Image (cartoon, helix red, strand yellow):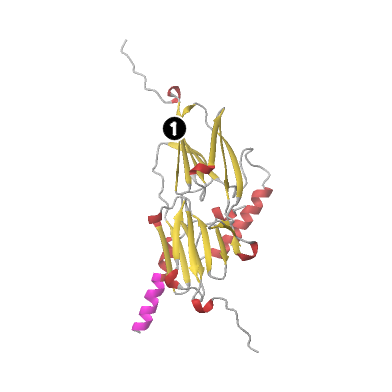
Amino acid sequence: MIARWYETFDPLFEDFNRLRSELDRLFDIALPLSNIRSVPRGTFPAVNLHDGKDAVTVQVYIPGVSADKVELTVQNNTLSISGERDTQRCDDKEITPERYHRRERFSGSFTRVISLPEGIDQDKINAVCKDGILTITIAKREEQKPKQIAVKAA
Amino acid sequence: MAAEKEKALSKKEERSLSEVAKGALVPPVDIFEDDEQVILFADLPGVAKENLNLQIDKDTLQIYGKVTKPSDEAGRYEYTEFPAKDFYRAFTIGEEIDRDKISASMSNGVLKLVLPKAERMKPRKIEIKF
């Protein structure tokens, strides 16, 4: 939907890059081999998943969505994020289609389900929304953390 | 000669922001217009208000949003659909936009830019006299 997320700006090759990204997108669709859980480029919202030492961090890119409009659930190692974003209203008035010059931003309801790594503690979840990025931190269970074993002299 | 030098210098400055932005992401925008103004919305997740740089030079409007990179913590990214990169996009605007009245606001990572039209450019009804 929003192929533009992956487009980068280059003052010299701006048009060339646009063409290249369009081609990439085309090949992405036609690619015979892809991960069974991968989503098409430009899926809203984009998600980053970081597997750290003490915690798993999930970043969800939801610009324009306020914290109270997001629903988060964790069950059986899957995290589900859903919500709604209406970009077709401005100052509580609907923007009629004929007034648009460009319409590139996602509008509508969304749901994403992510499978989490093993060994997370479902009771220790913290979610913070800042500048359009929702950061979910899930602690790892104690037994999953690396442990130092003292070696005794025999 | 001096004028030429000055011209080259100003051109260099003009280019500077776009040069800084090399490799930046191009944010998606919505642009719409009514009789009074042109309104632009841009998705800039991760850009705090103080890290947004808006520049208008003659007929070019430049948007540059700096993203704070996450600190290198131990571990690895299982997947990254969204790279932590800055945002850059530029537009040309016409004479009809009143440069002094442009206003901007940020909310939840979305930039709203209001570009009011100059009085003389607003549509007017012409009375027909008999």
Quadrant (top left, top right, bottom left, bottom right) of the C terminus of chain B: bottom right
Q: Residues within 10 Å of mark 1 (few under 14, many from 20)?
A: many
- Residue B100 in the image: above or below residue A150: below
Quadrant in the rendering for residue A148: top left
The residue furthest left is A153
Question: What residue is disc 1 on?
Answer: A55
Q: Position of residue B71 (x, y in %)?
A: 38, 43
The magenta span reads B2-13
Q: Position of residue B123 (x, y in %)?
A: 57, 76
B98 in the magenta segment: no
The residue furthest front is B130
Q: SS of the residue at dot 1?
A: strand
Nearest the eye: B96 or A43: B96
Q: Residue at x 51, y 51 (%)?
A: A64
Q: Is residue A16 visible?
A: yes
The residue furthest top is A154
Nearest the eye: B22 or A102: A102
On what subunit does the disc labeled 1 rest? A
Nearest the eye: A99 or A16: A99
Q: Position of residue A1 (x, y in %)?
A: 62, 52
Left or right position of B30 against B10? right
B8 in the magenta segment: yes
Quadrant in the rendering for residue B70: top left
Main SS, magenta residues: helix
Q: How many marks?
A: 1
Report the amino acid beneath label 1: Ala
The residue furthest bottom is B130
